[in-house]
Image: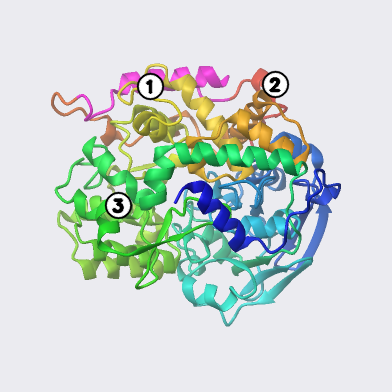
Amino acid sequence: MSLIESWQLLEKKFSTKKAKKEKRIEDSKMMGWTGKTVYVDLGSESVSIVRTNENLIRKYLGGRGLGVRLLSELEDANINSFDQKNPLIFTSGPLSGLAPMASGAVLTSKSPLTGTIFSWNMGGGFGSELKKAEIDALVITGKANRPSYVEIMGGSIKILPAEQLWGKNIRACTEALESKGRVACIGRAGEKQVLISSFVVDSTHIGRGGLGAVAGSKMLKAVVVKGEKELLPSDLESFRELKAKVLKLFDANPVLSKGLANYGTCAFVKLLDYMNLIPSRNFTGRKTSFSDVLSGEYIKYTFELENESCPCCPLGCKKRIKETGQILPDYDSLWAFGFNLENPHLNSVFEADRICKDYGLDPISAGSVLGACRELKARIFEDNELESMLSKIGEGGKLGNGARRYFSGIGRKDLSMDVKGLELAGFDPRGIRGQALAYATSTHGGDYLTAFMVGPEVLGKPVSLDRLSLKGKAGILQVFENLTAVLDSFVFCPYSGFVLNEELVSALLLSATGMEISPAELLKIGERIYNLEKTYNLKAGFTRKDDTLPERLFENKGEDKEHGLPKQEFEAALQEYYHYRGWDEEGIPKPEKLKELGLSFKEEN
């Protein structure tokens, strides 16, 4: 089945009304934005609604951009992440629920794990429902006097008691609320303020950065949303033509239509293993003898699978085992609990992933901290031991503080494979040099999705780059970072970047909303967002020394040119990156650059 046929089936499945035939829809409320920004104070149990600021929309679009701007306005960057004033900000995008691969929302807050600004591009249909409820941004502050959840039903917004849900893990909480709408909730790990905990959307989509712990500190168990408004584009005919073009491009892209559509992100395993790009044993090795049994091909051969699609996505990259109903682990979990731990047992990896999704634990961080423990103890964990350790983390164990905090506390910070406190994922930067620079410069810490350089350097999408060279990567990287910030602000799936560019997005925006923003201006908006995140982190105390990688990755052993990153070359590329960014040698945006972007920077006391 082609992706176009998959999209047609999705439209039938998720559509509740027929699209109106008018070429132009005059209801300004449904033109992508001009909806509501909702402020919820859990402490006073108050809800206030204001019109979304159109000036902010033109400068930051929605999603990640709007969330970052609202966060930077509300509180000082040096606020404690668990301060009741630190907001949780859910934002939809102008194309949420309309364009292919654009159904999610973005959650933004100050991360308790890293201390940086942090935005998570959610999957699932939460963002579509938020948009149908005519909400551009939902800002939650305060601390509830009792366990609570926020219920949004059309135009009704309530803060409701959640004592009956407190203590439940993700699956049980979602089952209790899903009849009301789309559910984003925390498990017991979030309740216990475990620093590697997350919200989970639809029991499936899990994030990073410890934002579940922020919710736990507020006694916020869940947000459930069900919208009523029909989402329609401004120019229906033009939008249909563009949507058809995008779907054809998706269908013609083998990474999407042959890889992710058939195997999910497990499709990455065979190629990455062949190229020696899967780090193992806490980044001390790069090859295992059991990659075949953790590959997408083997999993698809072994199990009868069904697609689990987000409402606006024809790929269905989340795969469900038909017999048991379990969602397959993503590549992140296959790496974290398989390759990283030298664990060849597929059932064990499945169970570890299930525990993480149920407790609401970030699998990358959980697997990374266990990988460091494995190295410290110099032994391989048994299956039941692995499961027990994960459950202890979910119940508030010290390893849940993340690798940097835990191993620094015992004098072994060298074991923590992180950037700015966020653990690295299963893409070895020693063999993907642009990704190395992307990890180091990411405003989130070790997050590969702020610029997925694996796309061009390994998969050749959207362009092919030499993965073993840092030469020329600094200028290219900042363009990818800016474009990713734009796609996150529209709340496109991160993997849409294999096809979408600023020209296509500009055309989609015009036909969907009637707002004309040129491709060049879209990239300028992305640059504005990235610089705002950078200034936030600077105010929070981050400096040039934080834009680096674990020392282990610079070690050069033997003649294998892929084994260690050349540190001098890396430092030169970092300085070149600062130059392209318009920052000084310490990585601080110059006044003229900030003026160009309409920003300002004043360090907090």
Disc 2 marks a residue whose amino acid type is Glu
Left/right of residue 595 with respect to residue 297 in the rendered view: right
The residue at which mark 3 appears reads as: 296
N-term-proximal mark, 2 vs 1: 1
Depth order, front residue of 7/425: 7
The residue at which mark 1 appears reads as: 571
Q: Is residue 122 magenta?
A: no
The residue at which mark 2 appears reads as: 596
Q: Is residue 581 magenta?
A: yes
Q: Are marks 2 and 3 in contact (CB under 8 Å)?
A: no
**Image point 77% across, 35% down: which residue?**
515
- Please provide the residue range marked out in magenta: 561-588
Q: Which colour scheme is used?
A: rainbow
Disc 3 marks a residue whose amino acid type is Gly
**Image point 31% across, 67% down: which residue?**
351
| Looking at the image, residue 248 lies above or below residue 136 | above
**Image point 33% across, 19% down: which residue?**
569
Depth order, front residue of 40/158: 158
Secondary structure state at the residue bearing disc 3: helix
